[in-house]
Structures are given as structure tokens and as C-alpha cells.
Amino acid sequence: MRFRILGPVHMTPRTPSAAKPRAVLATLLVQSGTVVSVHTLIDELWCSEPPRTAATTLQVYVSQLRKALLQGEGEEPREQALLTRPPGYLMRVGPDELDLNVFESLRAQGREAYEQRNYAEASALLGQALGLWTGAALSGVPHGPMLETSAVRLDELRTEVLEQRISADLRLGRHHELVGELMALAHSHPMRETLHAHLMVALYRSGRQSDALAAYRRARRALVDELGVEPGPALNRLQERVLAADPALAWHEEPSRAARPAPAAPAEPGPVLWLPPDVANFTGRQEQLALGARLLDGDSAVPTGVTDTSAQGGPDKSPMPTRVLAVSGRAGSGKTTLAVHLAHGAADGFPDGRILLNLRDAGGQGVDPVRTMATLLRRLGAADSPGAESVPGDIEELSDLLHRSTRGRKLLIVMDDAVSEAQVRPVLSAVPDSTVVITSRQALGALEGVQHLVLDVLNPQDAEDLLVAAGGTRMAEEPAAVTEMAKLCGYLPLALRVAAAGLAARPHWKASELAGRLRNERTRLAALALGDLDVRSSLLTAYRDVGPEEQHAFRLLALAPVPDFAPWSAAALLGTSPAEAEQLAEELVRANLLEAHRSPASRTPVRYGFHSLLRSLALEMLAEEAAPAVVPEATERLGRACLALARHADARLCPGRDRLAQTGGSGAGAELGDGWTDAEARALIGGSPLWWFREEAAGLLEAVRKTHKAGLWQLTSALASAVSGYYEACGLWDEWETGHELALDAARQSGDAHAEAVVLRSLGDLAWQRHHAARALDRYHLAQHFFSRSEDAVGAARCLTGEADVLLGQGHADRAAQCYEQALNLGRAEGDARGAMEALRGLAFVELVHGRARSALARLGECEAAAELAGDTRWREYARRSAEVARAVSEGEDGAAHGPMPLEVRPGVWLVQPPSAVPSAV
């Protein structure tokens, strides 16, 4: 074994002497097999105050570790264990090289042996696991947030293994030799009720009844003095049994599995309770609890499709139980917590017992139905029931015995974390008289006659209440931090509980400090771990449940726009047809790894999105598992799909406006590309390009950011240009500026003079609308220079129109008229109907400013004709509106207008002419 963390951190042949390199080693070992980001390691070493040279210093520590790992004293060089993997480092260790891996393996084997009632083997295996410990976990190194929580988790696991090993020894009759060990443990762990219970049993079986009662009193006093709570029901019942000298409490040797008789009907059963403790501070879910309680009480009508055995004659055995509640939801949504809470609250309705069955093994794999039924029989008290391996493939024998064991009994069975319908259907058929609650990450829709309950995240108020209830007074003292923390946790119950527990475990922290640690999306999941509560591990299990294709889709779709995206975005990112992309997305929705919603206001039938923490996981997995070219290629596919559809929508909203689409001068091309045909684009955009832009605007701007970050310069410029017509039409100035500043940088990075000209001209329009006249003129002049250099006379002419608009707004009507005339002549010479209509409406307003309304009316008629030729409905209607204004002025007076006169100089853009006859933009 080369690495040890179950005690002082140690590496053979040589452990780093300095504390911080040891802390790096410990952090990498705790997360062995997983990429640990540079940000996480820096946070671990220096917490919230890293030095300026933190990244460089970390590289030095990693280099020192690599040297020690690659060349030990007297050893041959071995395969590199410490690898650089963006966004950090990956430690690879063999199954037997890290003591934690060996401990986990022995622990799982020991639990399996205990479950199979092979207590001697369980005691030996669990004892070996405990023998690996040489002190407090991860000792000898400074602890940051990850090591601190990992140390708590590992010490908790050690105590759990110790308790189970002692339980196995008690079942083997080793109570005499356990008394001394248990007394020491009860003194060291005064709050562990399980250890106190084991001590009481060992003392009672050793003939020391009074000492057993004294042990109970000491335990009660410690709990009351320290926590202000009474012992739990289990410890209280044990005291009562000791007082009553319950014969069943004495040790009785259990027959070995080989010596057990053949299966037979069990003796008259007694009440059974096999439930974990109810969660403290259960918050929210009132509607779901009420529905579940009604079903468990039997007061509600039998759901459609459920067999009502009380109304049937014939065989006792029915294909399905009377009442089944299936609770589904994403990992961490509190399904098990809700089911256990319901079960604890339903004690009066199920006097024969309430039992929880875990349908996954220690490795997270689904348990075979045969094994599930065998476990249920053992928990029902059928001691002579066969183990799953005793009846290979013979599910009928187990089903018959289970049916006889549960007949006529009022039992509540909670089947937790089901993998599929096939896993639970045989068990349901074997317990027709029982009420069953099933929890699963996906809706078990193929089960007949089942009442379904889907859990989503908590509402914001319940989420904040849970944080305050579980986090204590420090949470309540900072309501703003609680609100932020709830949002950063995505209102997910597991994340909220971990955050609250993390604060409770660190009395030196404030709630606002914890919220600050959660703000960084790259380190958020690492911060949401404490002991065996680990949000990342829970979400990762759901990810590993799906197939390779779905995992690939889950990772790539993390690049999709937020908060939601259309199916065409998924198709672009995945590089598949829309139908294939939709099928993969729906599989992820079924696995609760992706969300789907339909908005009444949306023109897109279904849109998809990530829960924030699942998106963080997807981005982590993408960084860890994707080849270097995967992200840039997917980003380019998404950008090109956005460009194709945006150009198509822009051509319908503002025909002829986008010079890059008209000329193809950006290198991105004027074609739709990526397999989108005109018919497909029309179908995706629908009847209203304006609606399409409204739905996709946020995603299109994010696509501009992504393509710029990926260095796709020409694509960035083209995409920003394709969207600017929508920004202008809706007055979205901030979005317009953000996208175009990135586009301008991209054009300059690529040396594309024509793309730079297009972007500069658009930025000139933006500056003009924001009343920045000087900046607008500078942009128009520079754009005209680049258009001329690129031999784009149409673009240069349109810059003249923009310059004229600025001059008109400054009151220089005559100079503006000269620019408009020059632009009109160039536009007509080049056959540019759009440029001509823009210049004509400018000339019309010059006429209005001079009081020549009839001349203005004639110019606007020409403008309307040019708009008709260009196919631009918006400009045609605009020309008609403006003509109505000119006509009203013409009919009223031929002289100069008196008083302020509003002028709609472009569709939706107004100028006001004050008494001084100097127009100003509004």
C-alpha cells in the first residue's frame, strides 16, 4: 500500500515534509479518480485569502509530489499517478494502493455478510476494515473546507463500521468480551445512542441487569445535559425490556445457514419496525404529505387501475397490492425523507409493522427482486427463509412464502430508490395485502394502478425556512444570506440540508461567508459536502444510471443557453438530427437529469433546461471526460445553427439589413449551413420572427459570448450582426452593445475589415439612439472607411444615411440633405432598395423641417415603394404612418410648423422638433 489517509496522511516511500504539499496530496487522494480543480485546491490551501502567487505556488507543490511519486528510493519508476486534467489535477491509484479504497471494499463485504446473517464473516471483515485506521482521518495536515468535511465523513463511517462489527459480535455471543470496549466507547461517544444500546445489551447478557439500567441513566443524562433531548424510542424500549427481563433479549445461538430447515410458513408474527429515524426539522411539502397520508390511511378512493382485493372473491393472491404510492423526483429532492416521514406518521395505521427496503447495493447497482424478497422475509422475522443465493432463479418459492408471511397483516413497506418497474413488480405481486411506498429517480409509469407523486424543488419560502430550521440562529440572523443561499442551492432539499449542516458544524463561520463559497459555480458542489452528505455524489449516481449516449448528451447540453433552450439547440450541440436530439433529451428528462416545460406564452412546444446544480455537475463531467476538441466543435455547431436561424428570422424582420448575410464577406457565409433548409428554418421560426427572437434572444447573446471565448471570430461577428436588427426594433440597447463589442473585437482579431465595418455601422446606430452624437459620427466615418476599403459601396452609402441622421438631429438640415441625396444616388446605382428607402425617409424629414409638407409626402410615397420592393413590411407600414403625419401638416398649413413636432424617423425611433427647430432624439 502506497497511500494512507485513515490516520496521519502518509505516502510510501517518502511523504512530503512540508504541510501544504501534504494537504495537496490528501485532497487529491480523497478525490482519487476524480479531477480536482485548481480553484478547489487553492481554496483548500489558503481558504478565502489566497496570495497573488497561489496558482504558481500550487504548481510547485504538484511538481514536488510528481517527483516523489515517479521515483522512490530504491524503486523503479512507475506509471505516472498524478495527471494534469483541465480544470485541475487527477490522482490515479490502484484498488489496493489507498487504504480508503480497501476500507470501503471490506466495509461493503462486511455489510453484505451481515445482511446474509453470516455474522462471523461480517465481524472478521469489519474488523479488518477497522484495523486499517491508525488515528483520526486525514490528520497531520492543515484542513481546508474539503478536508474538514471529508475527515468528518470518514470518522462517521468508521464509527458506523464499529457499531456494525459490535452488533455482529453480540449476535455471536461475545457479550462478555465486549463490555470493556463498549464502556470506553460510550464514554468517548456520549451522543451515540447505538453504542449505549449495545453496552446495555452486553451488560444484560452478562448477568448485569442493574449495570445495564445504570448505563441507560448515564446515556440519558448526557443527552439531556448536552442537547436538552430525551433518548430516542429505541433506547427507551430497550430500557423497558431490561426492566421487564424480556427473555427475547437474552442471547440465543442462531443456527448456521447450512443447518437451517427447509422453508416453511413462519410462526405467528409480531410487530416489525425497520425504519431509519425520522428527519429532524422536516419543512414544507404539505400538499404532498396530505396526499400521501390520505392514501396510507385508506380514506381516499382507490386510484384508477388498482385492484381492490376486499371486493374480490376467488384466490387470496392478487396481482397488485391495494395501495401503492410511487414517489419520483431528481436526486436530492427528498424522496426518501418524505417516504420515511410518512411512514413514521402512519404508525397507528400499520400495527403489524413498517419496513424500509433499499433497492440498491453499496455500489449503487439495483438489487435483484429475489434478494429483495429474501431481505423482506428476514425483516419480517422469517429466520429460516432462504437467502437469495439459496434459490437461484426460483422466484416462485420466495413469492409464495412472502405472500403467506404478509397475508392479513397491516404492513407498510417502503421500497427505496427503485431502478425500474421490472425490479419492483415481482415484489408487489407477492405482498397483495400490504401498502407500499416506492421511491425512484424516474417515474415508474409502466406500473399499473399506482398513485404517482412527483417531487420538485422546494418553493423559495420553504427552502429558506429549511435553512433557518436546520442551520440555527446564525442562519436566522442573516436573512439576505439565507435568501441567496437558497437560490444558489437551487432550492434542492439535500443541498439545503448540507449547507445548513455545514454552517452548524463550523461555529466560526457566518451564513454570509458560506453563501460566498457557494457563489462560484466551479466549486459549489465541492462546498456542498459534509460527512456522508454529499450532493455531488447523489447527483453523480443519477448520471451513472443512464447509458453512454445519454451521459454524452448530458455533458454536451451543459453548453446550451440558460435558463432554457429549444430542441434545435440540442440537435446542434449533439450534432444529430432534431428527432434524435429530442429522444435523448426526453430520456434525460425521464431520468430527472434535465427539465422540460411548456409555456403558454411560448411558440416552441417544449423547451429544456438544467437544474443549476445538475448543470454544474454536467460542466464538471464535460471537463473531466470530454476530448479536447469536443467543446470547441460543439460550440461552433451551436453558433452556426444560431447564425442560420437568426439570419433567416432577420431576413423576414428586416429584409436586406445585414450586410454580412448579403455579401458573405465575413467568411461565415450567407448560406444557412449545418443542414438547415429554408423550409426547416421557417418551421422552426414559425409565423413571427419577432416572437422567435424574443424567445431565443438570451441564448443568442450567450452564443455570441461562447463563440468569442472559443476564438471563432468570424462566427462571432456574423452572429452579432444577425441579431442587431431585433435589438434595434425592441430598443434592447445593453444587449446590443454587449454583443457588438465582442463582435468588434472578433472582427479585429480576425483582420476582417468588412465585418469590422458592419459592426461599427451598427454601433453608430446605437450611439445615435443613445444621443451620443460625436461617438456615432466617429463610428459612421470609420465604418465608411472600411466599407470603401472592402469595395462595399452599399455599406458605405448606408453610413452616409447614418451620418445624415446625426446631422438632422443636431439641427443641420441642409448638410443632412446633402448626405441623404448622396446615399440615395449610391443606393439606386447599386440596386439597394433598403438603402434607398432609408435615404428617402430622411429627405422627407428634411422637407418637413423646412415646412414643405407636400414635398415630404412625395418622398414618403417613394419610400413606401422602395420598402415594397425590399419586401420589408415594417418599413412599408412605417412609411404609411409617416405619410399620415405629413398629410395632416399639408392640409393644415404649408408654412413651417409651429411648436414641437414629433417625427418617427425610423420604425419606433422618434425625434422631437422643439420651438428652436433643432430636433432632439427621444
Image (cartoon, helix red, strand yellow):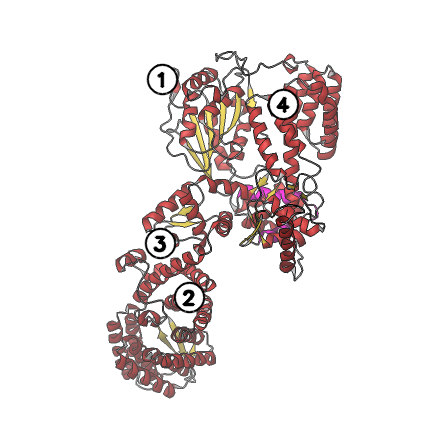
User: Going from the N terminus, do you reach mark 2 or mark 1 first?
Assistant: 1
Q: Mark 1 points at which residue?
A: 312
Q: In this view, does 646 lie above or below 431?
A: below
**Helix, strand or loop for disc 2:** helix
Q: How far apart are marks 3 and 4 (CA)?
A: 58 Å
User: Going from the N terminus, do you reach mark 3 or mark 4 first?
Assistant: 4
Which of labels 2 and 1 is toward the front? 2
Which of labels 1 and 4 is toward the front? 4
Tell me if label 4 and label 2 are in contact, CB under 8 Å.
no
Q: Name the residue under label 3.
A: 568
Q: In this view, does 745 lie to the left or right of 885?
A: right
Which of labels 1 and 3 is toward the front? 3
Name the amino acid type tagged 4: Ala
Give the magenta range: 492-519
Q: Position of residue 488 (x, y in %)?
A: 55, 50
Taking the spot 39% from the left edge, 24% from the top edge, the residue there is 320
User: Going from the N terminus, do you reach mark 3 or mark 2 first?
Assistant: 3
Q: Is residue 329 left or right of residue 15?
A: left
Q: Nearer the viewer, residue 479 or 572?
A: 572
User: Going from the N terminus, do you reach mark 4 or mark 2 first?
Assistant: 4
Q: Which of 111 and 839 is in front in this view?
A: 111
Q: Where is residue 690 in the image (x, y as percent from the top left)?
A: 34, 62
Q: Name the residue under label 4.
A: 168
Name the amino acid type tagged 3: Trp
Quadrant of residue 698 within the rendered picture:
bottom left
Q: Distance between the residues labelled 1 and 3?
A: 52 Å
Q: Where is residue 771 in the image (x, y as percent from the top left)?
A: 46, 76
Residue 716: give its label: 2
Q: Does the magenta stretch include residue 430?
A: no
Tell me if label 1 and label 4 are in contact, CB under 8 Å.
no
Tell me if label 1 and label 3 are in contact, CB under 8 Å.
no
Q: The C terminus is located in which quarter?
A: bottom left
